[in-house]
Amino acid sequence: MKIVFCGPPHSGKSVFIANLIDKLPTNAYTIIRACPDGEGTWSNNKNQKETSIVRKKGKFTKSFIDDACQTIDNQTNNIVLVDVGGVMSKENEQVFQHCDSFVVLSSDEKKKQEWLKFGQGLGLECVGCLDSSLEGQEEIYSRTPYFQGKIVGLERGKILEDSPVIKAIVSDIVQKSRYGEKTEIADSEFKGTMIDDTELGFELGYGKEIFTEDGTPIKKVRWPESSLPQIYQSMQEKVNPGQLVRVNGIRANFVLCTICKAAKKQGARDVSAYDIRTKSYIPIKNLPKKKGLKQVEGLSYNIIENKENVFMDIDITKEKYLLEDYEQCILPQIKEGKNLYLSGRMPLWLLASISSSYDSSKVFTFQPGKGFTCISSIDEKELGTIIDGVDGIDINKYFEDKKDKSKIKLPAVVEKQGILSKIKGWFVNFRENREKAKYLDDTIRTNVVSQTKATSLDKNTFQIELQKEVIEKSKSLKQTSVPHIPNQEMFKSDLGG
C-alpha cells in the first residue's frame, strides 16, 4: 500500500506523518520524501529552534522526481508513506501515478476538495480527507466511503498520544495494507549474522506488541539513546571475528552507527546496511583519509576544531549521491585523540561508514532538535549520552550563517599543481580559518541533555510490564466510544479508504 500525503502548504503533512509512524508497526512501513524541503522525521523533534536552523530547502528537478518515483516502485514494505509538496504540479502528478492511495490534509475547505479531486482524477483511492486546525476539538465525521474528520494540534515538535483520529487512521491503514498477513522471507543464501531492527529491539527490551482499534496486533520498537551500551553488548554476543554482518530496518542514525561500529570492533569481515532507495545492502567501509581534504566528488567537508574537539559538517554537493561516488570517497584526516562531532544530511549508510572510519576518543552523531549522541567512547559509561553542543564551538552561529549563504563561505577545491595554485591555496586557507575563528569561543560549555544509566535488563520484568500495557491498551480500546454520526451506518468492511 503506497499512500501519498497531500494538501496545501502548512497543513501539517510532515507532522501528521510523524504522528502516524509513532503508532504504525515498526517492521512494516517506509517513508519516502518526494519533496526537496530538507525535512526528515527529525523535523518533529522538540527543539524546534534548532531544527529550523538546520532545515534546508531544495528544488524540484526532473532527476529528483525520477529518483523519488523509482524509490517508491522499489518498496516492498506493506505500508509506504509518501510526503509530497503542497502544489498540484506535474511533478506531484508523476509521484501520484506511482502510488495507489492518498490522504488529504487541509485547513482550507476549497483546497481540500481540489486535492481530493486531483487524487481521485489520477485513479487513486482516498484513504482519508481531513480538516487540519491548530485549535478546536477533534472529530470523526464519517468512515465511508473514506475516512473523514478533523485533526487538531499538528504542531512541530509534538506527538498527539491520545488523538482518536490518528488511532483510527492507523487502524484503517494497517487493515488496508494487510499487515496481519505479512510473512517473513528469510535470505537462505546469506551465511552470516543478520541484525534486524524489530527483532533486536524486542530482544533488548525496546519492543512492544500493541493493538490497533480493530484488535490487530502490531510490533512497535522505540530506540532510546540509553540503549547503546546494550547494543554493544549484543554485538559482542552475536558477532564473531571474520563474520559477515547485514543490518536491516534501522532508521535511527545513532542505532545504525553504533551497530556498525560495534560489529567492526568485534572483527566482522564485512558489515553492510540495507538501503531502501537502491534496494540493496551497501558495505559499511573503513574509508581512506587525506590530510587537508575539503572536498571530493559529491561531498564537501567543513571542519571547525579546537584543542579537544573536531566538529565536521558534511554536505552532499550534488542532487543525488551515487554509489559510484561512494566508491571514490575519501575523508579528511583529523587528530584521532580529539572528540569528533559529525553533522550532515546524508544516507544513513554513509554516516555509518564515516563514523566507523574514525577511532576518535569519542564519536558523536547529530540529531537536529535533540543534540549530539555519543555512539563511541573510550569510556563506555558515556555511550548514549546526549549533549546540546560542542565545548568551545558555537555551532548554532555556524548553522545560522550556513543557512544564510551570503555569510558563509563553504570549502573550495584548489588543484595544487603549480606555485600559483599553492599561493591561491594558502590564501583560501587563511581566509577560511579567519572566517571559522569567529565560531571558537572557550566560554561555551555544553550541557548533558540525557545521561545513560548503567542498568541491567531484566527480561522477566519487561515481559510483565509489557503484558500490563497490552491489557491496559486493550481495555482502553474497548472503552473508547466512536463519535455519533447521524443517519449513517458503519460496517467493518467499510473501514479504510
Image (spheres, rainbow, N blue to C red):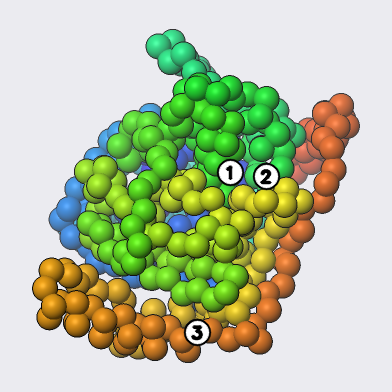
Separation of residues labelled 3 and 2 (CA atoms): 31 Å
Which quarter shows the N terminus?
top left
Query: Residue visible at 53% across and 84% down?
Result: 440
Residue 286, compared with residue 494, is above or below; it is: below
Residue 239, compared with residue 162, is above or below; it is: above
Q: Which residue is mark 1?
A: 258
Which quarter shows the C terminus?
top left
Q: Secondary structure at mark 3?
A: helix
10 Å neighbourhood of mark 2: few (<14), some, or many (≥20)?
many
Q: Which amino acid type corresponds to the residue marked 2 in the rendered image?
A: Leu
Q: Which mark is residue 434?
A: none
Query: Residue visible at 29% across and 46% down?
Result: 326
Going from N to C along the chain, the mark reached first, 1 or 2, is 2
**Tag 3 and tag 2, C-beta contact below 8 Å:** no
In-image side of 382 versus 354 (left or right): right
Q: Which residue is mark 3?
A: 439
Please provide percent x and percent y for residue 13.
45, 60
- Looking at the image, is mark 3 or mark 2 nearer the viewer? 3
Q: Which residue is mark 2?
A: 228
10 Å neighbourhood of mark 1: few (<14), some, or many (≥20)?
many
Residue 201, compared with residue 397, is above or below; it is: above
Separation of residues labelled 1 and 3 (CA atoms): 29 Å
In-image side of 69 versus 274 (left or right): left
Q: Secondary structure at mark 2?
A: helix
